[in-house]
Image (spheres, rainbow, N blue to C red):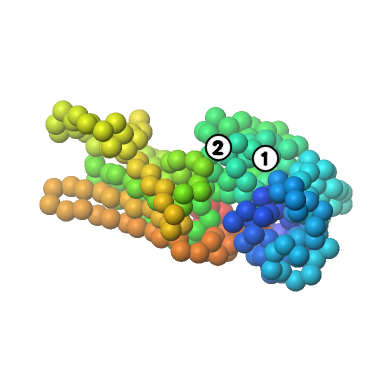
Amino acid sequence: MNTKQINKPIPVLVSGALGRMGIEVVKAVTNSEICELVSAVDIDKKNNGKRISDLIDIPESDVFLSNDLEGSLCTISQINREKTIKPVMVDFTHPDSVYDNTRSAIAYGVSPVIGTTGLSSTQISELAIFCDKSSIGCAVIPNFSVGMILLQQAASVAAKFYDNIELIEMHHDQKADSPSGTCIKTAEMIEEYPKSFNKPNVNEKESLNGVRGGTRASGINIHSVRLPGLLAHQIVMMGSAGETYTIRHDTMDRKAYMPGVIETIKKIGSYSSLVYGLEKIIF
């Protein structure tokens, strides 16, 4: 992978600009010396055509909100005519639209940075093939928090020593998908140590369907909680004879994700394939 010094700011389109995460991304991109906000897209029709700086607390900007992602991608793709720097689309939208959004960005030669969770493994594989054919870098990042990446790394190492593991993820009640993409990624990293987990010691019977959570093929159980007042939290609980080992990460403010977002924007242009997970970017 080539790492070139960035002499010009990276042009950035934010898709889902008026969502909770989108607003933070717009602020972070605007305040970053290595990025330039050139487009903001959202499905909010009542604010279509309004100056983004009138909608979000950022310095005065000439960027106007658009409902037209395809048109905005076409426009931002023209910035890359000299091939000196690749434009980037950051997507925090909805599981129902993220796959099509990502394919569209790749088709226009815009590197997608995807924070929206809900992509299936099949969809990620299809996008990876599309990236390879197009020689476009794409980052699918279930979680942009450095602390969460450290939790996942610790859990993957500990899996060698524990045969019983339960995952609990807790999010706000506006989150559309469950379990979270972050929790699925945690399970996948644990499962890189090839063995079966949570082998039954008794013949379990659930008097309430699903009370033991969802069970992956590896045997790992995942429990999802959705409540107002929460933001994003994950607990990994491991047990063996006479002890438990618990790893926990709590996000109290979406600003925690922004250093990871900016670092991914900075680096994705030097890739020509799909990258899955922030650890592939920062380590």
Is residue 107 toward the left or the right of residue 221 in the image?
A: right
* SS at mark 1 in the image: helix
- Determine which residue is flagged by label 2: 119
**Displayed quadrant of residue 21:** bottom right
Q: Is residue 29 visible?
A: no
List x then y, in percent, for residue 243.
16, 53
Q: Is residue 96 visible?
A: yes
List x then y, in percent, for residue 172.
46, 52
> Would you say the residues marked 1 and 2 are in contact, meaning their CB atoms lie under 8 Å apart?
yes
Asked if residue 266 is positioned above or below residue 180 in the image, the reply reads below
Q: What residue is rendered at 59% in x and 56% in y?
A: 20
Q: What residue is rendered at 78% in x and 40% in y?
A: 70
**Displayed quadrant of residue 37:** bottom right
Residue 206 has which mark?
none
- Determine which residue is flagged by label 1: 102
Q: What residue is rendered at 62% in x and 61% in y?
A: 24
**Nearer to the camera, 272 or 142:** 142
* SS at mark 2 in the image: loop
